[in-house]
Image: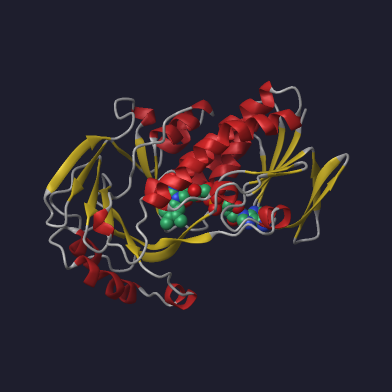
Amino acid sequence: MTRVLIVGGGIAGTGAALALDKAGCDVAVYEAHPDSAEDIGAFLTLASNGMRALAELDASAAVTSIGFPLTSMRVLDDTGAEVAQVPLGEAGTPHLRYRCVRRGDLNSALQTEVTRRGIGIRHSMRLVSVDDGPDGVTAHFADGTTATADLLIGADGLSSTVRRLTAPDVRPVYAGQFVFYGYTREAPDTATAGTITMVRGSSAAFGYAVSPEGEAHWFARVSDEPLTAADIEQGTPARLREMLLPRLRKDTTPAADLVAATTDDLMVTNATELPTGTPWRSGRTLLIGDAAHAASPATGQGASMALEDAVVLAKSLRDAPDTDAALTLYETLRRPRVEQNITVSGKYLPRHPHPVGARPPGLRPEPARR
Ligand SMILES: Cc1cc2nc3c(=O)[nH]c(=O)nc-3n(C[C@H](O)[C@H](O)[C@H](O)COP(=O)(O)OP(=O)(O)OC[C@H]3O[C@@H](n4cnc5c(N)ncnc54)[C@H](O)[C@@H]3O)c2cc1C
């Protein structure tokens, strides 16, 4: 039985744990954070391809119990006029519908499912170094302990330690936009349950969806120079509203009112991406998820791609004659698809000083399936 050590208990790491366990591997997950609630603030949209990957892991129920479904997308121009309304993904199949979830809730639900299946997940285990030897790969953790396996999966996200150790020259780069998130109970009357509304604003790409409980989840992507660390750390809700509102008030859309009504639940982050063509493999180590192929958020595909990685990796290990052949097969299958997502998402992120309104907002249609 192949022993697999997964570094990172986020979406890619928990997805891989469920998939590799199902494929008959001996799996253990090591997560740096003391609990599952890191980054509880931001929300994301799982697309139908991500929901399909969850179904292949028999984990649909774990995720359909959180968040809320989205079955259509409407697009408004900068006057607030509706210019399009289209169905989203596999809207007719309940467990495959797009789903809006808080990222922390998704992590928590997937970690609970991992534990429910008897797969070991250890918290407060921060990887610091890796030794790759002829008989196995050994992970060293900050608390001085070690673990050894046949394969180490680096699922430790955008700022991956595994990637820094195996491909030290690869660095995430600023993707040309910073992104605000917020939540408010002051949802506009026009909001329709199950619909995500995208606003082609003149100075920001804005989107919002309203939960069945009446809470609007909104984001705004602004094309400009990156925010400084101080901008982000000192970004009180009032300061963030001041930064964003003048850009939204130029237009007559619901965006400015939603932001003005958002009192506390407001945050901002610089969007980053990894260059294409970076190495994923080194000996007995493989990078997956954002550690391998983080994309800017315009296509809304990062979490769905991470879940697809998990399914394809498990099938590759199940079907190939040995681990080396499996990793080659995995990379052959995954690289074109995830790199297309990086490229497409980058194209939909207009770079400063081009006006955001000149390009279509995300969500983009899902990438074509293999
Ligand atoms: C602004 C923004 C908007 C987004 N919107 C969407 C969207 O709408 N739809 C979508 O699908 N995706 C979206 N994404 C992308 C999505 O959040 C990521 O693609 C996804 O979270 C990647 O999952 P991951 O498991 O690879 O990484 P992460 O979720 O970052 O998980 C990595 C895990 O590794 C752990 N870790 C880190 N270092 C170590 C270490 N040294 N040792 C042990 N553990 C470690 C971390 O604590 C974390 O739990 C968005 C991203 C951003 C930034």
Q: Position of residue 272 (x, y in %)?
A: 48, 58
Nearer to the camera, 105 or 355: 355
Give the quarter of the image for residue 92.
top left
Name which residue lies at 67% across and 24% down: 318
| Res. 191 visible in picture | yes
Give the quarter of the image for residue 1.
top right
- Its colouring scheme is secondary structure
| Res. 35 visible in picture | no
Left or right, 28 with respect to 264, comes to: right
Give the quarter of the image for residue 312.
top right
Relative to 357, does residue 155 appear above or below in the rendering? above
Name which residue lies at 38% across and 29% down: 95
Q: Where is residue 138 in the image (x, y as percent from the top left)?
A: 81, 48
Q: Position of residue 113 (x, y in %)?
A: 55, 37
Name which residue lies at 22% across and 58% down: 201
Left or right, 267 with respect to 8, comes to: left
* Marker count (numbered): 0
Left or right, 220 with respect to 49, comes to: left
Q: Position of residue 276 (x, y in %)?
A: 55, 48
